[in-house]
Amino acid sequence: MDTDLIEIDSGVTSRAARQRHVLVVDDDAVDRERVANYLAINGFRVTPAESGKRMMEILRDEPIDLVALETTLRGEDGQHLARRLRETSMVPIIIVTSRAEEADRVMGLELGADDYVTKPFSMRELLARIRAVMRRYARCESSPERSRAVRAYQFAGWNLNVPLRALKAPSGERVPITNGEFGLLLAFLTRPNRSLSRDQLLELSRLRSTEVYDRSIDVQILRLRRKIETDPARPELIKTERGLGYRLRASVTTVYSRENGTVRSEYRPAAPLIQGI
């Protein structure tokens, strides 16, 4: 077991019965208090944190529904904090920062943030973005499959551990994977042997934003192929389907974690697949 994995309370019933809990991380006391007070007035439970260290302590002790993270904390690497948070937890993240450059916004989303707000911003906008992100997560949590938490997906000898966001090769070697690549691969694994358009992949992989466009999918596909294909120039797993999009051509086994043990289910194509380009 990975001792660094943070266990976040994500039970649908318990969340519905309590206030949504937002962790506001900012080393500027004035901004931190302003955001915390506004969210509290609008029905949220709010816990403030002045540093990345304090953020991780709170996450270990409290059920958090969303983290509003300022990435320009004094003496700390905000990108490292965002990466560490996403590697150890599935909690939603909204980056709140004074960095307005496009490269910073794209990097934040690539690190796994769900949204990005640049200072100065209106409190109403931040509130709307927080509610929108929480609605997306609530829809996922209320799905029928939520009663059986997915532990891993297995395909063509590969293993994707979902809680740990860890990709293991057929050789047993752990292969580094970015959050963008993880989201894209997960989109394919949950819909194997189906043609998925770029627009569908953007939505399913949660890469959709005003800063990320559908051609970025092609870049992510290329990177993912370099990691899981024997010959990325002649892909056998992620196939291009001209005029349609992409398809994962593989049998996928889903490993579920349940209170009474582990359950496996396997998806195999019922008919011959269309040859991709």
Image (tube, rainbow, N blue to C red):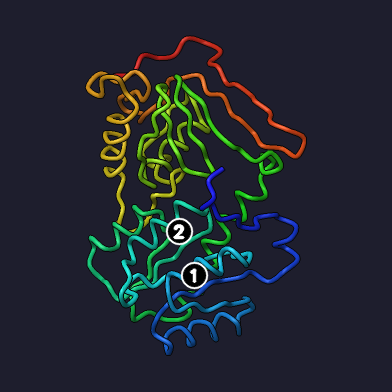
Rendered position, 158 above or below 100:
above
Q: Residues within 10 Å of mark 1 (few under 14, many from 20)?
A: many
Q: How many marks?
A: 2
The single residue placed furthest to the bottom in the displayed view is 30
- Residue at image position (77%, 35%) is 260
- Residue at image position (42%, 22%) is 170
- Residue 251 horizontal/vertical position (percent): 51, 19
Q: Which residue is mark 2?
A: 85
Marks 1 and 2 sit apart, C-alpha to C-alpha, by 9 Å
- Residue 46 horizontal/vertical position (percent): 58, 77
Q: Which residue is mark 1?
A: 55
In the image, what residue type sits under mark 1?
A: Met
- Residue 71 horizontal/vertical position (percent): 35, 70
Q: Is residue 73 toward the left or the right of residue 139 in the image?
A: left
Q: Are marks 1 and 2 in contact (CB under 8 Å)?
A: yes
Q: Residues within 10 Å of mark 2 (few under 14, many from 20)?
A: many
Pick the front one: 159 or 15: 159
